[in-house]
């Protein structure tokens, strides 16, 4: 039992090193998406059971058994509910935890942090601003330069490859990958 508990604690707090972390400025308008978005009434039918439980009921998906923990393609990750642009592959790193980890948000204004005292510990929960989706948690054990590890549930995000940014409505982020 103690070994299992130690393994689970390791999974929650372990970290690796980032590929690329850099501050960015974006032309993305937070107001544009907030004016366009209205949470669908049929959200439960639109999402998988796991996506719904994670984003709406603050659940956590299994480590190493999720879509993006070992995903290395270049692009951005958006909220599965609203499409808010949240993270970039340029800030993704292998934390060894089994969940996608990032050193910083793509658009800081779209990621909300709040105190979480569940499971008898103090953590910082991460939620999307517009859809209020539970994304995961942020820890202060990440690599330089931010020292942060945004540990995110794959079930809460959708990947947009860099070559599809324009056609899917995210042309503002082409420069993130040296594209026009």
Image (cartoon, rainbow, N blue to C red):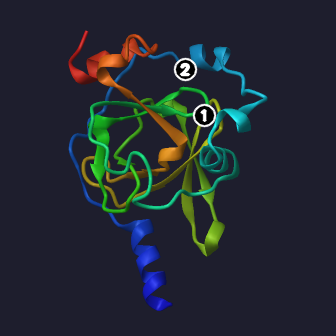
Q: Position of residue 3 (x, y in %)?
A: 43, 87
Using the numbered discs, state the Cα–Cα distance from disc 2 to disc 1 in whole angstroms: 9 Å
Left or right, residue 160 beside residue 45: left
Residue on which disc 1 sits:
129
Mark positioned earlier in the residue sequence (2 or 1):
2
Res 160 label: none
Q: Position of residue 141 (x, y in %)?
A: 35, 61
Q: Kindly state the secondary structure of the residue where label 1 is placed.
A: loop
Which residue lies at the image location 22% right of the left edge and 40% below the top edge? Answer: 20
Residue on which disc 2 sits:
30
Number of numbered discs: 2
The residue most toward the right is 41
Q: Nearer the viewer, residue 134 or 63?
A: 63
Q: Nearer the viewer, residue 176 or 73?
A: 73
In which image quadrant can residue 74 be found?
Answer: top left
Which residue lies at the image location 55% right of the left edge and 34% below the top edge? Answer: 80
């Amino acid at each position: 039992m103690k070994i299992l508990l130690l393994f689970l604690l390791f999974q929650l707090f372990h970290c690796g090193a980032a590929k690329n972390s850099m501050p960015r400025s974006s032309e993305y308008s937070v107001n544009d998406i907030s004016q366009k978005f209205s949470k669908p009434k049929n959200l439960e039918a639109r999402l998988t059971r796991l996506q719904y439980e994670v984003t709406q009921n603050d659940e956590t998906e299994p480590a190493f058994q999720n879509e993006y923990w070992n995903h290395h393609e270049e692009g951005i990750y958006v909220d599965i509910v609203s499409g808010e642009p949240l993270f970039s592959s340029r800030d993704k790193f292998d934390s060894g935890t089994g969940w996608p980890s990032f050193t910083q948000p793509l658009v800081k204004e779209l990621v909300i942090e709040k105190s979480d005292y569940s499971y008898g510990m103090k953590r910082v929960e991460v939620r999307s601003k517009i859809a209020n989706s539970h994304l995961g948690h942020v820890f202060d054990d990440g690599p330089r330069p931010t020292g942060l590890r945004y540990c995110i549930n794959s079930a809460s995000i959708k990947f947009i490859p860099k070559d599809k940014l324009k056609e899917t409505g995210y042309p503002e982020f082409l420069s993130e990958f040296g594209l026009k």
